[in-house]
Amino acid sequence: MKISLIGMDIPVLLPSLLTDLLFAGHEAAELAVHESNPAMAEVLKKYMDAVIARSGLAATATVNGDRAEALRGADAVIYAGDLMPASRFRMDREALSGSSEEDPGLIDQARVNGGLGGLIHTLRAGHELLELCDVMDEACPDALIVNLGQPVARTTAMLLKRGYRAYGLGRSPLKGANGIDTLCKKLKREPKDVRFELAGLTNFSWLLSLTDAATGADLLPQLEEMARGDGLGRLSRRWLDWYGALPVGDVTDHGEFLPEQEDFSPEENPAFGETVEQRKARILNMNTVGRAGVTTPEGAAAQLTLLSQAVPVRPVQLALALLRGEDLDMPAVTRRNAGELPQLATDAVIEARLTLKSGVPQPHGTLLPQGLAEICSDVAETNRLAAEAAFGDRAALRECVETDPALAGLDRLYCCDVMDSLIRLHEDVLGEM
């Protein structure tokens, strides 16, 4: 089995990817990483070799500056790229900020996933991803793709449109200020002691049920009572009233797909990957493992630090279950709807529990509250149109602006003009559209 790891965020994910592959999955795979920086390639190669040696498996690792060679013959590709560094976001924010206090512009639309900012982000991400697809069409046309490239719903839609078998993993709704872990704390319970169902869209996920794992007692009414008393924040209370469900995960993500909200503004300085300090510390720890190995006290401490900083997504676990035809239950996976959420279009890209039996997805037929189904349908259609626009479809771009619920109350024709300006601003990446 060959697994190719592609994208700028792969080095950050590598410790958990190797752990899931070698120690949890016991798979002696051929791992191929694309890394064009020779110095970083050496760091990654030595680190991977040390971890593989500790596993005792006959796995192999290559780090290649040639992306086509890294992809050639891959059974699965894990993609974790993003063309949204902080500098690009600042360009968007400045362009949307207006020129004076009397002309505030559309600063609320400086967003990462939704609205005008999310749309230009999608176009930039699409430019990179579709170039990758061109290489994959020749190097590994039948590969499974597990996609972590933001914005995940839209990049997954692009991969599906290109004909790939694609699944995505967005920012985990299990962690964070409104994550499952935090909601359980509110109820004085541990996440392992509850059963829950999440559904919706990537970065727009909602809690549909929450029960005590031992007794089956329904815990959701307690959370809803907390929300109505502002115990979960004003946005949770508002959206529970509007949509009949509680948002789960980072509510900043939810807010980006909705019109301007009272008491809410998109983040001014969202995080994009590692800080410089985090990157230096990661490289130092990887070098330590590569030099000292994993079994020495020094190397073991460095590896433990790397794993403690791992993000809570498991793309290798998902890829192995699909490739090996295994059983799996994963609470939040991005994929084509295909009837999983019957109130949404069958080709919508959703986020919901994925249950595999011998590698085959099992339908749940999850129903959403009517208000939630309506807004999810609108956001899913916006995501679909944004993905179409990334293929250079100008009609889809205009329709996306006309459809996007995040632009409610704004002059849509003016928003189209603003998008044209943003496209020109990033023509070094996008070229002519």
Image (cartoon, rainbow, N blue to C red):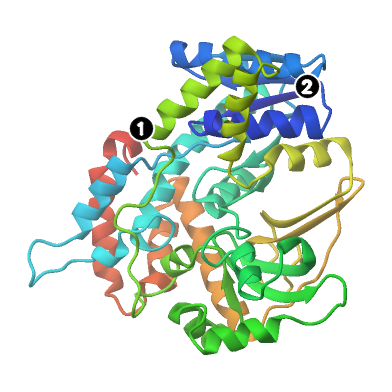
How packed mark 1 is, by other alpha carbons closer than 10 Å (few <14, some 14-19, many 20 or more), is few
Q: Residue at x 23, y 66 (%)?
A: 106
Q: Is residue 32 visible?
A: yes
Measured as percent of width and height from the top left, residue 210 is found at 73, 75
Residue receiving disc 2: 29
**1 or 2: tag closer to the N-terminus:** 2
Please say whether residue 142 is visible from this viewpoint: no
Residue to which mark 1 is pinned: 276
Callout 1 secondary element: helix
Left or right position of 41 against 268: right
Q: Residue at x 52, y 78 (%)?
A: 232
Q: Position of residue 239 (x, y in %)?
A: 51, 81
Dot 2: element:
loop
Left or right: 38 in relation to 359: left
User: In front here: 281 or 3?
Assistant: 281
Name the amino acid, label 1.
Val
Q: Residues within 10 Å of mark 2 (few under 14, many from 20)?
A: some
Q: Nearer the viewer, residue 215 or 137?
A: 215
